[in-house]
Image (cartoon, rainbow, N blue to C red):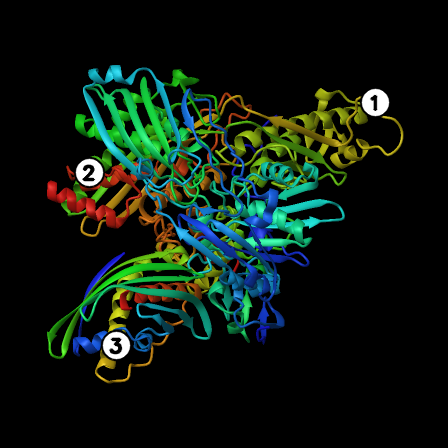
Amino acid sequence: MRELHTIQLTVNGVRHERSVEPRLLLSDFLRQDLELTGTHVGCEHGVCGACTVLMNGEAVRSCLMFAVQADGAELTTVEGLADGAHGAAAATEGVAEEAPLHPLQAAFHEAHALQCGFCTPGVLLTLIPFLEENPDPDEPEIREALSGNLCRCTGYQSMVEAVRAVAEGADRGEGA
Amino acid sequence: MEIQSEFLFSGPRDELWVNLMDPAVLAKALPGTKLERVDEDRYVGEMEATVGPVTAARFDVAIELVDKVVPESFTMRVDGKGAAGFTKGTAHVQLAEQGPDETLMKYTADLQVGGRIAGVGQRLLDSVAKSMSHQGLEAINRHLQGEAPPEAAAPVQLLSRPVVLAIGIVVLAVLLVLLL
Amino acid sequence: MSAAFFGAPVPRNEDHRLLTGQALFVDDVQLEGMLHVAFLRSDYAHARITSLDVSAARESDGIVAVYTAADLGEYWQPGPLLVPPQPIERLEFHCATQVPLAKDKVRHVGEPIAAVVARSRYEAEDALPLIQVELDPLPAVADPVGALESDAPRIHEQFESNLAAHAIQEKGDYASIVEQAALVVRRRLLHDRGASAPMENRGVVASWDQKSGELTVWDTTQAPIPIRNGLASMLGLPEHQVRVIAPFIGGGFGPKIMMFYPEEVLLPWITMQLGQPVKWIEDRQESFFATTQERNQVHEAELAVDAEGRILGVRDSFVYDAGAYNPYGLTLPINTQCTLLGPYVVPNYYSEFRAAFTNKPIVSPVRGAGRQPGVFVMERLLDLAARELGIDVTEIRRRNFLPPDAFPHDHGIIYQDSASLVYDSGNYEPALDRATEMIDYARFLSETQPAARAEGRHVGIGIVSYVEGTGIGPYEGARVSVEPSGRVSLATGVGTQGQGHFTSFAQIVADQLGVEVTDVEVVTGDTGKFHWGTGTFASRGAVVAGNACHAAAVALREKILEQAAQELEAELADLELVAGTVRVKEAPGRSIAFGELAVLANPLRGAVRPGTEPGLEATAYFGPEKGSTASGVHAMIVEVDPETAMVDVQRYVVVHDCGRVINPTIVRGQIIGGVAHGIGNCFYEQLVFDENAQLQNASFMDYLIPTATDVPPVDTDHVVTPSPFNPLGIKGAGEAGAIPTNPLFAQAVENALQMPGLEILEMPISPNRLFELLEAARETG
């Protein structure tokens, strides 16, 4: 039996304490140990960005980190976005009875910025700190911000449109 | 992949020859390598690529020397197999006396890398192989001059475990063929 | 019935779950006691297995079982031939399909040799190096042309050579007209391999319940029903005891269609051996070897035209790389053969292909499915002919388009659906007009390009056209029902990989039933919910399943009206369906809710009229007699740096005809995504194999799929010629964006550089390769 390390961390506002093998990847820890399967694993070598989560507010690739490296950290995964943890939640038409979405999620819905949706959690979590830092980005800046996330379905254009819509909504004082 | 290069040793050819045949010396040039001479012209051993505390991959290696012309030239066949793939290669090594204390090694190697390791790190292979084989030969050169070889270089910063491991393994595979 | 939703840009029903991390993908399935599988795969492209000893691995920590081919007993069988050879007269065909675990020989890198089952994937992978396998390497075959030489190493010993197929299709008499041609353009054109690279790799979870005798399989397949039927047959189980679920799938693009991949066949067997659920998730590196790939072809082609550039005929002979096994039979080369004809009048056509086995991963359709190489050949030859004759590239196309009165147009050669290649409808010139207008073709050539040239900048324009056979049979089905709650549910058999079926199918049904799109709950890809059909491929989901949904909704509407007419004591003609109720048009107060009708349709006591079917439910099927032919024109503006050979794609225009559009937002998304895939395929994505058939770039660090900065803004528009072959008039759209990008890119780059010696006759063309061509053209020019 390999040695285990006890780690404590907060994920989406919930504190967890677990014993893990040092080699356990953070992505596997989130998906298997915490059953937060919204974080997806697409390449296991840090290129595709599907596994992106927020660690202490910054976007990190959870497939390139060990769970033990997140000891003491505060994490946000896609499951933690809609509850208003990051900015005010926006109501969306047509998706009644469900938790209100984060403005960025709502904009993705409106702009058809997702197809299979596999890359989407990582894309959202890449864009959230980007938008906090740069609330009114132009198209080249948005494309640059997205360039570390691979998407095979959309051709990215609708993601760019969604981000612009959020920026314009924020200009008008809506949403976050 | 074919590689051609040369290296100038500061030492007499006969002594270099002896060193090149000594698994203990070779192991110093190749961090993570254990070699054993099973008979005059055959060596077996293992090489390990490690990153920090993690053993990445192990290669079982078998080396055979053929067409030996002491102390001028030899051909070496190397077979390495491990969980991440294999390497197979032939190297022709020629040693020419440049002076009483200088020997020029010319080598050509034909290297095949297969399996998972072949798919990763190819674009780095040439340049990394060149610089690392130079380091290895430099270590032998220092040994020839009676100096202790430097500590093995620190592992590459932990960027992405599989990536670093794969590159490490490929580099080891190249070294195996180039240096032995 | 007015169409409130058909044609409207409705946002998608499925988005909420995907956006909040609540959607279930195969890797998200976690079951009590679930074990994990890892595969030992071949490092060699071609080798004999001389010994295999798994005893040490069996002893390793956490290992539950290790299986080799020898352990499989009679379950060890080559996979099915998925597409039997089409009825082409002049045909030779040899079939060799993949096996679950290699027995005597391995035929490509990554072919599985043993399966390790452990408590965790980590432990399973720990045990792989403990397996002692001796592989005696054989010379490997990487090049499909070389594979057909008489002294090439033989990949399948049961055949006399590596020839997998040889077929000739012909119409008219090319040989007799070539003499009359004003110009014959002859070239050798190459198309290399690429990966489908969906963001989600493949995966399988299988769970056997001994007590109920039921097998449940979650599979990243585009075609769960054929997989269920096949597994039931292989495992000797009744079909209804096997449930295959394709939940949310993270992109398909072809290789997930139906393969009976080794892992897909083994995991269900393993769970039945162990009585515990098992999971295997492909990692990205595995996917470069273990998932099918496509597009390596070498064409020797010629185009004969008259002095005005009108096509007299085409002669094409090509070699097609089938990879190590060919379970898809002739599908891809036939698609190439047929799609090459494009939207043009081609009176004489001679097309011959040889399919070659090689020691490379298996080939099966990838978005476009053989069409790209065909379109590449035809469009490139037209460009070269236009250049020789001094005709504009748009003009030579215009002169050769099939006229609008030529439809349905029968080409008289056999298509992938085994029937004659018939174009249902089309109107090509308006699409060309629209595309030239959108990209401002005339002004680009007269003003923009000369102005840029004066500044020393090399900008170029391209414009090409193509057709795509879509929506082929055999059939799909759908069941629509209203529950006592009043909710409408729809189940269909096709799987969904992001195409928006949860919305587009709901739109079709909502229109018939007078409910909101969000009121229709759609289930796809679960054989427990619907078990008749084939799957999502060949741009057929919307066409075939969409029409089945329509037929089922129409039938249910009738049923609802009849039931309501009885209850409300009204005439059918006086009733209307509004917001989940049926009401009398003249007296809206007289109404009854769907839910109430559903309860009444399923009485617990009393008698019903003879012949009554219970429930507010209807099932219907749709099988088109022939597929529908979509078409389009793509245009592109590029800027090339002749020093570095970097190409910047600056604008992209698509005018597409996929018949009647269900949801323009979804279609636009499909098209733009396809264009991105196409741009990858022409400039970034190439699977590079060395002479030993070892893949050199098996990661996303070296195999580059386009990022947000590589894909230009794409403007789309539509021309609508409804298909007469299905009631909704739909044509498929899923693959369209990716099909004509290669020749478009080549044409635009040539146009930008204006070098007489520069001809781009190979795809993909990396910056490095383009640089070489530029150097060569400078030397000769």
Q: Are marks 2 and 3 on the same chain?
A: no
Residue A144 visible in rendering: no
Quarter of the rendering occupied by the C terminus of chain C:
top left
Q: Which residue is mark 3?
A: B19
Residue C86 visible in rendering: yes
Whole-percent x and y of residue C383? 24, 31
Instruction: Please tell me which residue lies in front, B99 or C766.
Output: B99
Q: Secondary structure at mark 1?
A: loop
Q: Chain of mark 1?
A: C
Whole-percent x and y of residue A5? 57, 76
Q: Secondary structure at mark 3?
A: helix
For mark 2, does the 10 Å Cα neighbourhood hold few (<14), some (14 to 19), or many (20 or more) residues? Answer: few
Instruction: Report the amino acid beneath label 2.
Output: Glu
2 and 3 marks in contact (CB < 8 Å): no
Q: Look at 49% across and 50% down and name the residue there.
A: C112
Q: CA distance from mark 1 to mark 2?
A: 77 Å
| Badge 1 or badge 2: first in the primary sequence | 2
Instruction: Report the amino acid beneath label 3.
Output: Asn
Give the number of the mark in front: 1 or 2: 1
Q: Chain of mark 3?
A: B
Instruction: Please tell me which residue lies in front, A117 or A47.
Output: A47
Q: Give the left or right position of residue C430, taking residue C759 as reference.
A: right
Q: Which residue is mark 1?
A: C609
Q: Which residue is mark 2?
A: C447
Q: Give the left or right position of residue C703, taking residue C302 as reference.
A: right
Q: Look at 39% across and 59% down and name the residue there.
A: B86
Q: CA distance from mark 1 to mark 3?
A: 101 Å
